[in-house]
Image: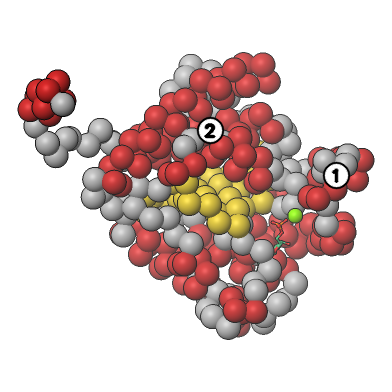
Amino acid sequence: MPEQWTVCPAEAMKADGLRVAELDTSGTPGFTGGKKAGVALLAERSKVLSDLQEKLYANGRSGDRRSVLLVLQGMDTAGKGGIVRHVIGSVDPQGVDHAAFGVPTQEEQRHHYLWRIREALPRAGQLGVFDRSHYEDVLVVRVHNLVPPTVWEPRYDEINAFERELVDEGITLVKVAMFVSLDEQKRRLAERLERADKFWKFNPADIDERAYWPAYQEAYQAMLDRTSTEYAPWHVVPADRKWFSRLAVTELLIAALERLELDWPLPTFDVEQQKRRLAQA
Ligand code: AMP
Ligand code: MG
């Protein structure tokens, strides 16, 4: 772990006991450097992430069933898309299974809410990334009463059981909740209305959602309190500073991949013999 981290990122950003309403969204927990150091470190650490991902992929090709799944949650403008572009974008796209979850389609609505999630799980050796996830079914669904409490309430336990199953199948879950302040969200939405290259990200409904901020904070709090488990813990990433959230997620992924203790797969052939054959070919 680089020395600018005084506390390891997983520890510094663990959700246990955290109060969402009191979070400093402009903070850089565990990291002592500023933006310049953070950006420089991110470039360096992206290479480490990329090497580890390649090892995961190589092992997947050699029969290892394991995979890693980054689950991203956060309000609009929190920077989930930026994580996908800048963090996941630094690794080999062949090894990435990406899925984004929006309002369920008609087909999805006919199924259990976990159906579309199961369909999108990373294959062996892949780095999966979920831009939103099954957690929408206890967030937006809860906030807007899309189903009654008797339906969403049991979902916390159901999600815990589901994730237990995933972990047992060899999927390492890296759950990241990104938080911006209400003011920072306003700045970012304003930017989407100022720049031609950002209009496509703007959704008029995002402005309406701002009125539900306290209800979302409550729903996020319940999510963290009830679904941060020892086998699939939540990490809370302050996201007002994009350089920090990107660095933080990079480090969380590196730590998860390092825990897999991956080595390069051994050859299934005699290397010396193949060298001799090649010399004569
Ligand atoms: P975006 O991520 O900006 O493309 O927006 C996707 C939208 O889909 C967000 O407003 C989510 O709240 C919404 N969404 C995602 N999952 C669900 C769900 N299960 N039920 C209702 N809305 C959802
Ligand atoms: Mg959006």
Left or right position of 79 against 230: right
User: Tag 1, which secondary structure?
Assistant: helix
Examine the image and state in which quarter residue 86 appears: top right
Q: Badge 2: few (under 14), some or many (20 or more) residues near its Cα, within 10 Å?
A: some
Where 94 falls versus 271 (above or below)? below
User: Tag 2, which secondary structure?
Assistant: helix
Identify the residue at image location x=48%, y=51%. 97
Question: Where does residue 64 sit, x and y in percent of width and height?
Answer: 25, 48
In 3D space, how far apart are the residues under numbered discs 2 and 1 (Cα atoms)? 25 Å
Identify the residue at image location x=61%, y=67%. 138
Mark closer to the chain start, 2 or 1: 2
Left or right position of 271 against 6: left
Question: Where does residue 15 sit, x and y in percent of width and height?
Answer: 54, 47
Q: Amino acid at mark 1?
A: Arg
Colour convention of the picture: secondary structure
Compare residues 267 and 170 and report the one nearer the observer. 267
Q: Can I make out residue 277 in this image? A: yes
Where 138 falls versus 53 (above or below)? below
Identify the residue at image location x=34%, y=52%. 124
Compare residues 64 and 19 and report the one nearer the observer. 64
Q: Which residue is mark 1?
A: 192
Q: Badge 1: few (under 14), some or many (20 or more) residues near its Cα, within 10 Å?
A: some
Q: Which residue is mark 2?
A: 90
Q: Which mark is residue 164?
A: none
